[in-house]
Amino acid sequence: MRLPVAEIFFSYQGEGIYAGKPQVFVRLKGCNLKCRYCDTKTDKYKLISDTEIVNEIVKLSKNYFLPIYGQFIPSVAITGGEPLLYAEKLKGMLVNLKNRGFEIYLETNGTLFKELKKILGFVDIVSAGIKLPSANPGNKAFWNEHKKFFSIAKSKCFAKVVLTDKTTLEEIEKSAALIAEVDKNIPFVLQPATPAKGGCKSISPQGLYLAFKTLKRTLNYATILPQMHKIWGVR
Ligand code: SF4
């Protein structure tokens, strides 16, 4: 099975509650959404067989994980774009990686719930976005998709919302209510957008405070975390 791979590299997880975790990243081409703040380019890619991808992951893991830990505790982040676009094609590779003792970390925009079902059994951690209407040019809402997605991912996932100057408190309240209806214990991360030249602006300090207060009223675990890899200057 061949997959469209934009890049494979070793780095440190830069977002969410596992920030700092050393991982091999496999970035797949394309996405079903067009977020205003998207900083990921996947237009250049190569079609690579799943066996070759696994070989590359194993090679990078041997280079990096062994010296770091003195033992083999490898973690692979399957990311994009939107990796669930290739759920069916990913199965064989994920089985191969699990058999080799890899931890599988899936980074997704949290909309393709039917695709998630196909591979959730092979995934250990799901980092799932909640894409707010203000995040996309058409102000499209994905509340129903997200509700179904989190109901399936439940104990394996945490939720992440990127906050911009366009984010409204109503959107945060709706996101918190959605997660609370599924499970109040799902960790929820507020991620202020990293200001980019010519790109979107981040939320104001006052807006961030109100967003956090809203989550704390509704959920058991809420936190604010920026994109750490941008601060560390790594990929
Ligand atoms: S879901 Fe992620 S990859 Fe897709 S457009 Fe939004 S930020 Fe970019």
Image: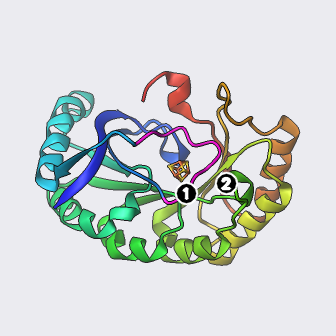
* 40 on left or right of 79: right
Whole-number angstrom distance, CA of label 1 to CA of label 2: 8 Å
Residue at 44 percent of width and 25 percent of height: 234
Looking at the picture, how far across and down is residue 190, in whole percent? 68, 48
Residue at 66 percent of width and 69 percent of height: 179
Residue identifier under label 2: 136
Type of the residue with mark 2: Asn
Mark 1 / mark 2, whichever is N-terminal: 1
Q: Is the C-beta of the residue carrying label 2 under 8 Å from the nearest atom of ligand 1?
A: yes
Residue range highlighted in magenta: 32-42
Check residue 88 in the rendering and tell me which mark sits there, or answer none: none
Quadrant (top left, top right, bottom left, bottom right) of the N terminus: bottom left
Residue toward you, 84 or 180: 84
Residue 181's quadrant in the figure? bottom right
Residue identifier under label 1: 33
Q: Is the C-beta of the residue carrying label 1 under 8 Å from the nearest atom of ligand 1?
A: yes
Confirm or deny contact between disc 1 and disc 2 (CB under 8 A).
yes
